Amino acid sequence: MSRTIGRLWRDAVSAGRTNPAYLVEGPDGWHEVSWEEAGRAVDEIANGLLALGVRKGNAFGILAQTSLEWSLFDYALARIGAIGAAIYANNSPKDCRYVLEHSDAVGVLVEDEEQRAKIADLGLPHVISFAELDDLRARGREFAGGNPKALADAEAAIDEEDLFTFIYTSGTTGPPKACMIRHRNYYEMAACTEHVEGFAISDDVMLLYLPLAHNFGRLMHLLGAFIGFTIAFCPDPLRIAEALTAVRPTIVPSVPRLYEKVHTGVVAKFDEATGLRRRLVDWALHTGRQASTYRQRGDSLPPGLAVKHAIADRLVYSKVKKRLGGRWRLGVSGGAPLAKEIGELFHALDILIIEGWGLTECTTAASVNRPNRLRFGTVGPPLPGFEVRAAEDGELLIRSETIFAGYYKDDEATREVLGDDGWLRSGDLGEIDEDGFVKITDRKKDILVTAGGKNVAPQNLENALKTAPLVSQALVVGDRRPYVAALITIDPAVAEGLSSGQVQERVQGIVDGANADLSRFEQIKRFAILPREFSAEEDEVTPTLKLKRRVCAQHFSAEIEALYA
């Protein structure tokens, strides 16, 4: 069997599924798109591209928000053997041009005229906007009428070893690198989830807001076709709360930032409770934590606890779950570390979030907690078909069918991460316990080495700070410095009504709490509260909300120097 994305898509369309393929929001609300409609659109776009002269091996950019048009165009490119070069919709004109020039793209799909303006000076042969897709489809129908075998012939020429896409890394440590992902890499990535019990099922409705230019979002879009669940597209991350109640999804993949914000809201609401209401909340959380210990092992609840849990659900948990749509079955967290406390609190509220780990170079994920076998604070056991081991220095190594083909035009960088033996160096430090659960301790390159020669993992400290509702972001510094310090940003909604002195006092308490169980050399000695959050507009965070540490440190260099004055 040829493991191509074209094959994956054709199997999906011909499976006779009766549930919708997609849900899309329009002026008059959400409407369904059937598998048949989607299949027809992909055929027509693919034929339209062939009519334009786009062929196997040509790179073609996609510059748009997460949407139906993005998804269908991606499958059309896959069916003719063209290589998708995805670009984040919020990228600067400079970054957009970099991807298109570096990938040698022959064209680009743009969402609108604003996106077209970013790349107008490149002079690409083919620039197609969403508004022009109907014309492309009409051209495809005409082309297919005169060349009925052209699409089938184009697809037959595609081998599973051929490139499916270029995915550009976040650029947290320099210019983005283009990961070359083969057809079989993503096919196997989707296929291995079939062997993860309870992960995704055909009856699911997934709310997808993650950028499709990122490997996590891209996998979810392919997984929808492979497994057969319905995807509801939410192009604007700021409208997730509305979409949750309108679509009522059963599964939501996300970076930790969404869960952190919901966690902040829930904790703030609970803190407001007094008297009988407060005692009820505390009892429900205690009951939920008891139930969580059984569920983490995959065990059934004892009858007495099951009754208490049902009462707590009706009185407390259901109120929180209603804000998430009321049908929540599973949240999937990836892209950055999720604080252990956040996963535990949600589970105590009968809301399951499982954390996974991987990187673009292994085509998304290498390990994930299972719905019926999980351990908070870890990223779960390796996925089926994956080998994960720790090198002598603690760096985690990965070997699987999903390992990428290397970095485009950068053999030296490829050799730095991929050995001849097929083991991929992840750049993450971690450990694997006796039950096979993987725990990430930090990024190898992010480790701080203090002036005293002590190694400090900043992400652990940052996660500890961010569990407090008042703290929205944290950047821990201290490399080659005498002690560890932190830059902290404040959630304005939580700080409303507090004086600057009160904010300072509360943050000091949060820092003291984070320091409580740490060795002296790891403890945060001083901190600065910044006047604003780190932002994508200032190039301080990646599109998936990871901090660009060097950029942040440059922009707030005066504040950092003051911490060591």
Image (cartoon, helix red, strand yellow):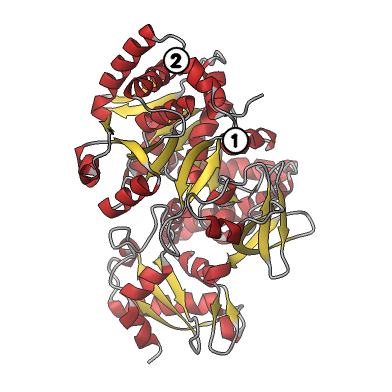
The label number, if any, that marks residue 161 in the structure image: 1
Nearer-the-camera pick, 474 or 67: 67
Q: Secondary structure at mark 2?
A: helix
Q: Which residue lies at the image location 46% right of the left edge and 43% below the top edge?
A: 166
Residue at x 63%, y 26% (from the top left corner): 2
> What is the spatial separation of the Cα atoms under label 1 and label 2, in whole angstroms?
21 Å
For the residue carrying disc 1, how many other residues have a C-alpha within 10 Å: few (<14), some (14-19), or many (20+)? some
Residue 198 visible? The answer is: no
- State the residue at coordinates (30%, 64%): 492
Check the picture and name the quadrant holding the C terminus. bottom left
> Does 235 sit left or right of 423 as displayed?
left
Which one is in front, 290 or 541? Answer: 541
Which of the pair 418/461 is nearer the observer? 418
Q: Residues within 10 Å of mark 2 (few under 14, many from 20)?
A: some
Q: Residue furthest right?
A: 434
Q: Secondary structure at mark 1?
A: loop
Question: In the rendering, at what x and y percent does residue 283 appear?
Answer: 58, 55
- The residue singled out by tag 2 in the image is 150
Q: Label 2 amino acid? A: Ala
Residue reaching furthest bottom?
A: 565
Task: Specify the quadrant that holds the N terminus.
Answer: top right
- Report x, y in % for residue 557: 34, 79
231, above or below 270, in the image: above
Residue 439 x/y as whole percent: 66, 60
Name the amino acid type tagged 1.
Glu
Please name the residue shown 52% across and 70% down the image: 446
Residue 142 to residue 165: above or below: above
Identify the image quadrant of residue 188: top right
Upstream in sequence: badge 1 or badge 2:
2
Marks 1 and 2: CB-CB under 8 Å? Answer: no
